[in-house]
């Protein structure tokens, strides 16, 4: 470890022209002759909740290719399947669960909300309420004027640890929210602060960047192309002179990641301006600046910004909807031309199921790329991945039947050494997803007897 003349606070910011950049953990943040557990190097857990709609190809009768999600074997002797095999490099951090269910998933939406749902294009199905029940384990109560539920597990954690970071939590989505009636649309959010307060999910990378690092354009109106890093370059240079070689390398890597995110956002803005000029007075709305045309680049950029937020300790709780319920998005870039939601009603057609496997595997590859960045980022004496715990899954099983058992469910990360990953837990009977929520709360230092419809916790 390089011992400096003075030690840096973990909350050190590089500031300039009204913007600020939080730093990754550096050795210089550890005072000499101080017990590690009493310093900024003490483990600080990050939590994340990553949602993919429309279930997984895992329990489809008559599908020749078989279950493409559930690992073979149990315990430590398990083998990942097609959809989850992108996680193989991080298998030691993966815990898979068999026979998880969520009885809070409604089978339909009653009248009067049903009529409003139909006008919004949802018809009599459960997609309008699926996201909210994934992290709550609580059925929606339609007997009151405004359907009520409960706080979601991410927000329970944010209440406990969110005060330690500038942003208690982040809610992110990959695409604009789908509209809906006023008394139902809120339940398209994954996160609820309390029974009736959904939290909006940000899908525009530029807005997310501004929330994390400040609005460069507004803070420096004299320079249209102002970069956050340009505005703090003098402070950066001064800090680098006080750092040892290892810390300088960590800081350089962090600044490079911020610059790469800025460049992709700027390219998106220039593309948007070109589209606006080309459209002229055609009456079509301009493309929102900051949202990337290429969905693969959009998803990767959002994952990169989440990784930067964790690394800079701007937040320790993130919820990410990787694509919307009932989305009509196509995946032409991987050879899937039919949109995701219609394809999810596969009617046991092997060709359509194979296309679903492609989509679900592609999303897992994007998630695995994100894990790779965290595995490479030092966080004290560990890595960010070792000090994180992520729930990845869906609130449906067989999307064609709208079934909610067994749910595709993974925990990924070391949780600061508290979770023994690298195993598949073949549960003895159908187990509420809220049992896993309760276990995650315990790992966050929150001791509760129950959560949602839990019947106990799962030993991790």
Image (tube, rainbow, N blue to C red):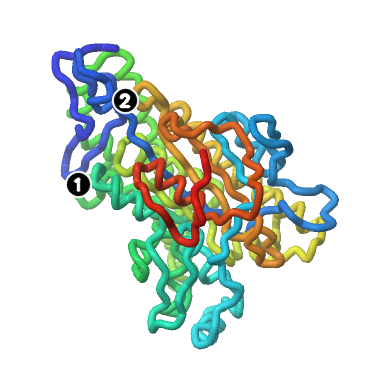
The dot on residue 392 is none
The N terminus: image quadrant? top left
Q: Residue 363, image x and y in percent?
A: 59, 47
Residue 108 percent across, percent down from the top left: 59, 76
Identified at 49% across, 61% down, the residue is: 453
Which residue: 24% across, 17% down?
Answer: 243
* Pick the front one: 416 or 294: 416
Q: Which mark is residue 220?
A: 1
At x 56%, y 56%, the residue is 432
Question: Can you identify the residue that label 2 sits on?
Answer: 251
Residue 414 visible in the picture: yes
Give the residue displayed 42% in from the left and 69% down from the top.
Answer: 149
Q: Nearer the viewer, mark 1 or mark 2?
A: 2
Mark 1 vs 2, N-terminal side: 1
Distance of label 1 from label 2 (alpha carbons): 24 Å
Asked if 358 appears above or below 43 in the picture, the reply is: below
User: Which is more toward the observer, 393 or 301?
Assistant: 393
Task: Name the residue nearer the viewer: 315 or 236.
Answer: 315
Label 1: which secondary element:
loop
């Amino acid at each position: 470890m390089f011992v400096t003349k003075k030690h840096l606070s973990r909350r050190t910011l590089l500031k300039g022209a009204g913007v600020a950049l939080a730093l990754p953990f550096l050795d210089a943040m550890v005072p000499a002759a101080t017990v590690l557990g009493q310093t900024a190097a003490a483990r600080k857990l990050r939590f994340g909740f990553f949602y993919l709609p429309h279930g997984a190809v895992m329990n489809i009768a008559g599908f020749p290719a078989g279950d493409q999600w559930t690992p073979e074997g149990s315990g430590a002797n398990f083998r990942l399947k097609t959809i989850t095999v992108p996680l193989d490099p991080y298998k030691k951090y993966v815990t898979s669960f068999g026979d998880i269910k969520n009885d809070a998933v409604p089978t339909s939406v009653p009248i009067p909300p049903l009529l409003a749902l139909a006008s919004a294009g949802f018809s009599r199905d459960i997609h309008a309420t699926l996201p909210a029940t994934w992290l709550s384990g609580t059925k929606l109560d339609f007997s009151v004027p405004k359907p009520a539920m409960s706080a979601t597990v991410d927000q329970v954690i944010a209440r406990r640890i969110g005060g330690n970071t500038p942003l208690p939590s982040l809610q992110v989505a990959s695409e604009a929210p789908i509209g809906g009636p006023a008394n139902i649309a809120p339940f398209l959010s994954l996160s609820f602060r309390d029974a009736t307060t959904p939290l909006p999910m940000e899908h525009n990378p530029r807005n997310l960047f501004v929330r994390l690092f400040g609005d460069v354009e507004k803070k420096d109106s004299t320079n249209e192309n102002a970069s956050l890093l340009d505005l703090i370059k003098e402070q950066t240079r001064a800090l680098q002179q006080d750092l040892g070689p290892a810390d300088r390398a960590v800081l350089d890597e962090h600044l490079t990641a911020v610059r790469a995110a800025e460049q992709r956002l700027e390219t998106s803005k220039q593309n948007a301006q070109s589209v606006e000029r080309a459209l002229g007075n055609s009456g079509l709305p301009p493309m929102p600046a900051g949202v990337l045309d290429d969905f693969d680049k959009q998803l990767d950029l959002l994952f990169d910004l989440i990784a930067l937020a964790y690394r800079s300790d701007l937040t320790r709780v993130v919820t990410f909807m990787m694509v919307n319920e009932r989305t009509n998005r196509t995946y032409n870039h991987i050879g899937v031309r039919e949109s995701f939601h219609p394809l999810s009603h596969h009617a046991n057609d092997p060709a359509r199921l194979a296309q679903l496997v492609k989509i679900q595997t592609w999303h897992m590859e994007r998630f695995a790329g994100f894990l790779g960045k965290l595995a490479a980022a030092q966080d004290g004496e560990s890595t960010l991945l070792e000090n994180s715990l992520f729930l990845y899954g869906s609130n449906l099983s067989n999307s064609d039947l709208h079934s909610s058992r067994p749910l595709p469910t993974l925990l990924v990360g070391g949780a600061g050494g508290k979770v023994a990953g690298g195993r598949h837990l073949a549960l003895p009977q159908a187990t509420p997803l809220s049992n896993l929520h309760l276990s995650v709360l315990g790992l966050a230092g929150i001791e509760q007897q129950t959560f949602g419809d839990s019947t106990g916790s799962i030993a991790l």
